Every structure is written in C-alpha cells, then in structure tokens.
Amino acid sequence: MSLVNLTELSGSPLFEGLAAKEIEYLGSIFTAKQIAEGKTVFVENMPGESLYLIQQGTVKISQMLAEVDEVDLMTLTSGDVFGEMAVIDGGNRQVRARISENATLFILHRSRFNTLVSEHPRLGLQLTLNIVRLFSARIRRAKKDYRAMLTVSLARKR
C-alpha cells in the first residue's frame, strides 16, 4: 500500500481535530489518481463507493435537469472534498463530477473507511463527524440557495 502525503492538505475541513500523526496514518488508506481535464469522475445514479479529496486541480459538480440541461452546482479546488456520503451510506450518486482542470485526487474507498472505523474507532469517529459536518454545510448552502430562488420566483409572480 503506497503512502499518500496528506500534509499539505491538513487544513482541509476533512481533517479538522486530527493530529499530524493521525493525518499521516490516513495517508496510508487513501490512494492517488491523476485525471485529465474533461474527464468524468462519476455521474448521477452511479454506485457511490469513494470519497474524493482534491490535491490539485478543479472539479465541477453539476446535475442534469430534464435529461437535456446540465446545471453547475459548485466548483471545487485544492483541499475540497466531494462524494463524501458514499463512504457513509454507499448510495447512488445524486450529481456528476467532472474535471475542469487537470487534477490529482486522493481517494478514500468505502471498504477502507469501514476498516478504519473498526480498527481505529476514535479516529474513525472524528473522520465521520467531519464528513457529516461537510455534508451538513452543503445542505445548509443548498437550503439558502433554494430560499433565494423561491424569493425571486415569488417576486416575479406579484
């Protein structure tokens, strides 16, 4: 198993509350993958098996509407995480992720996450809490965006 150096990304919200030694250990369960601009990481309804941490590059998260229109939801860069719920629930992807600038991604597979939780419960719990916080922040942001959209829509009807 190769060691992924997570040191430069230790400021990522994914690693909040973790000691340097714990982050170093996590480097042993992540894998690295370089992906070229324009390539798709995953699409909607694809089984979710991994969490992705961007080491470098840019990733666009989007969603198809009515099977013809693609709407950009967010652009992510170094230190950002996506696909985080896959390691928790293994459900299908709800969005698509596409590389918009050559990227190096650090990948945490669900099976390795589950092993971490079993073998290192305190570290597994902290990582799980950080994943839940990331997801919660995304839900709050989406709710705020939805309210703004509703406000504009209702204002137009008046």
Image: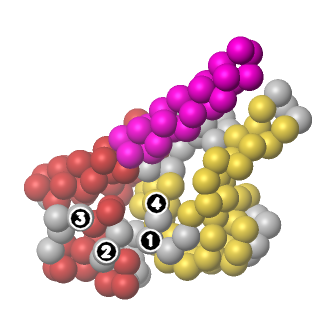
Discs 3, 4 touching: Cβ within 8 Å: no
Residue under the image location 25 percent in, 79 percent down:
24
C-alpha gap between disc 3 and disc 4: 13 Å
Assess whether residue 151 is covered by the magenta stretch.
Answer: yes
Give the residue number, with chain letter if any, for mark 2. Answer: 11
Discs 4, 2 touching: Cβ within 8 Å: no
Specify the label residue 79 is tagged with.
1
In the image, is residue 95 above or below residue 119? above
- The amino acid type found where label 2 is placed reads Gly
Task: State the SS at label 1.
Answer: loop
Discs 2, 1 touching: Cβ within 8 Å: yes
Give the residue number, with chain letter if any, for mark 4. Answer: 81
Discs 4, 1 touching: Cβ within 8 Å: no
Specify the label residue 7 is tagged with.
none
Specify the label residue 16 is tagged with.
3
Of badges 4 and 2, nearer the viewer stands: 2
Which image quadrant for residue 33? Answer: bottom right
In the image, is residue 25 above or below residue 43? below
Task: State the SS at label 3.
Answer: loop
Q: Which residues are magenta?
A: 135-158
